[in-house]
Image (cartoon, helix red, strand yellow):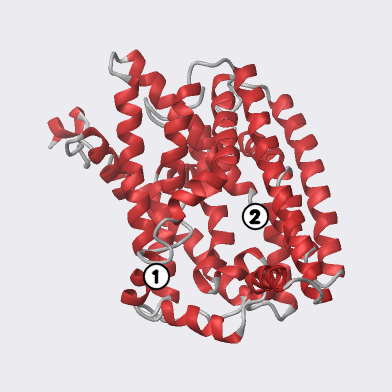
Amino acid sequence: MATTAPDRILTLDVIRGVAVMGIFSVNVVAFAMIEAAYFYPPAFGFHSVWDKLVWLGNFIFIDGKMRSLFSMLFGASALLVIERAERSGRSPAVVHYGRMLSLLVFGLIHFYLLWWGDILALYALVGMVAYAFRKLETDKLLAIALIGFAISFAASLDRAIGVEHAIEVHSQGAASSEEMRQADTVYRHFHPSAAEIREDAEVHRSFRAYLAQSMGPQLWRPWTEFRSLLAETLALMLLGMAGLRSGFLTGEWSDDSYGRVAQVTLSIGIGASAIMAAVVWLEGFRLPFGANAMLTYSAPLRPVMAIGFAALIIRLSRRVGPVTQRIAAAGRCAFTNYLGTSIVAGLVFNGWGLGLYGKVSRADAWLLVPIVWALMLLWSKPWLERFNYGPFEWAWRSLSRGKLQPMRKRAPAAAIAAA
């Protein structure tokens, strides 16, 4: 089992580093323009071939896949902390729920003050549920995860059918007034009016306006998303627990095994995603298929490709070179890097920064991604050479343990004696 420190597992850090970097490739759109464009590109900022190519790359390789990978890693890490608490004689429940409650605090602050797309509150709430499955063997974790995926997909498919019906009613224009009102609401969700786009931009012009929305109409959103995303997120966390317990995520399998897993899962996932993307593109991103392909039909491919990416990353990171070390450091500081992207993107796009919100296309917004990736890789490793944790990792650990944790690394005894 490869490790970077006595309490670190290298493969988990590397995979987490790739995931946190990949997530921003998709999230940057949600920072830069109206929310509808995040789920349905033609809603805003989608005019040039470059916009479509950015969407294409994200749809096939990133969208939902990196989030799935991140969710799996969260489940694996939670189980790792629980098992270490048990071995050290501490109460695993106290340790786990202390971490989850502290994470919930960070998540809610992140949501209400910085960004509607926060995932930390969701992880904290689902993580509390996942604790009940900590004793299960690998096969049972996998079985329950499959049930969770099935429940999630069934609910998503039901919503997709509703979208299809609403778009059909809207196009025909022949229905009861109430049905037409509902159909128009669905249609405008994917095609916001110019007035709605202006109103949304105004919300991001000032922090006071953003806070009024997050604490007003959006007040209960973290809790409603917990309800709607519970089945899928829990399934992904249990999949991560199974990956840890089986040795898959800790690098204990053979190179040939990782190679076969990556080849099969990524061939299926990339092939099916590419075909779906081609149909969406050739049909001009028309509704309802253009939206449902991204929201529903591609959903079963996400965990499949997440497993494949994990296998590929582990296989490629066998030799710990400079690049692997940088990515692993970014993974060790994933909490700080995740929140850091919100801070950087907020300063670039919102009115209390450069004010580019609603003024750039999808491709223009994506130009920030490689800059942020470079920042993650540049700062994480030198920081960890001097300190035990990333800044927000330190704050999370201190809050969950109820006391300040040692931040700066102690100098080796030999170095102290030499001084």
Q: Which residue is mark 1?
A: 213
Q: Earlier in the sequence, mark 1 or mark 2?
A: 2
Query: Viewer-nearest of labels 1 and 2?
Result: 1
Name the quarter where the C terminus is drawn.
top left
| Rendering coords of residue 325 (x, y %) | 48, 42
- Residue type, label 1: Gln
Residue 38 drawn above or below residue 6:
below
Q: Is residue 321 visible?
A: no
Residue 293 drawn above or below residue 154:
below
**Disc 1 + disc 2, Cβ < 8 Å:** no
Q: Is residue 146 visible?
A: yes
| Rendering coords of residue 313 (x, y %) | 62, 39
Front-most of residues 3 and 100: 100
Question: Mark 1 falls on what kind of element?
Answer: helix
- Residue at 44% over, 82% down: 202
Q: Count residues near mark 2 (Cα–Cα under 10 Å), then give few for <14, some for 14-19, many for 20+.
A: many
Marks 1 and 2 sit apart, C-alpha to C-alpha, by 26 Å
Residue 79 drawn above or below residue 51:
above
- Residue type, label 2: Asp
Q: Quadrant of residue 292?
A: bottom right
Which mark, residue 63?
Answer: 2
Which mark, residue 375?
Answer: none
